[in-house]
Amino acid sequence: MHRTTKQVSSADHEHVAQEKGKTARRRIAAAAGTAIVMSVLFLSGCGTSQPDNAAAPVATVTVTSQPTSQPGSTPSVESSETPSAASSEEAVKMPRLVGMVLQDAQDTLQSLGSYVLDQQDATGLDRWQMLDSNWKVCSQDPAPGARVPLSATVSLASVKLSESCP
């Protein structure tokens, strides 16, 4: 067996070390860039579905009293109905959402001013609907046509587009 040896100068060693360092920095930069992109994509799907400028509904209650003939007596409070947030809150007619793509159903509800949603996996597997445009609505509560206050929770059960509703 014949071996040949080549003498390498210190400048050659330095050049090889620099190239290894550049390669390592490129790998770190690529990994960091990938991590940043994945974080942005993940966090963009985790935001709230309610816009920042949406104000909570405010209920106004008016209480009237009538003067009594006796000083020092407690005034009486008259009311024709019991004040409640639900009675003074705006209500909408619930649209039919079953069969729609989940993202379109959410957009429909939000266009009506309804932002309180409960999304469920209709198969019972408790999967998260990470990409709403890949799911379809199988059932909804409240039912289509019902008058619903804007603060009411709307439950949507869905499956992936390629699956059948249970």
Image: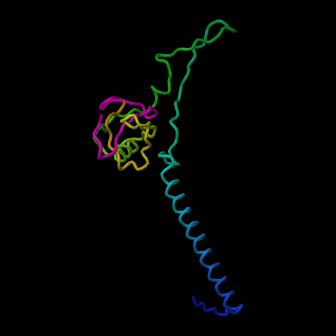
Q: Nearer the viewer, residue 163 or 145?
A: 163
Residue at image point 38% right, 44% down = 106
Residue at image point 65% right, 10% down = 74
Q: Quadrant of residue 31?
A: bottom right
Q: Which residues are magenta?
A: 142-166
Q: Nearer the viewer, residue 148 or 136?
A: 136
Q: Position of residue 4 (x, y in %)?
A: 61, 92
113, above or below 71, in the image: below
In the displayed orientation, state which residue is furthest to the top: 70
Q: How is the image coloured?
A: rainbow
Image quarter in which the C terminus is found: top left
Q: Nearer the viewer, residue 123 or 4?
A: 4
Q: Quadrant of residue 63?
A: top right
Looking at the image, residue 141 sits to the left or right of residue 37; the answer is left
Image quarter in which the N terminus is found: bottom right
Looking at the image, residue 41 sits to the left or right of residue 109; the answer is right
Q: Position of residue 17 (x, y in %)?
A: 67, 82
92, above or below 53, in the image: above
In the displayed orientation, state which residue is furthest to the right: 10
Residue at image point 36% right, 31% down = 141
Q: Does 81 lie within the magenta span?
A: no
9, above or below 103, in the image: below
Q: Does 156 lie within the magenta span?
A: yes
Residue at image point 58% right, 71% down = 27
Q: How many marks?
A: 0
Secondary structure character of the magenta stretch overall: loop
Q: Position of residue 139 (x, y in %)?
A: 32, 34
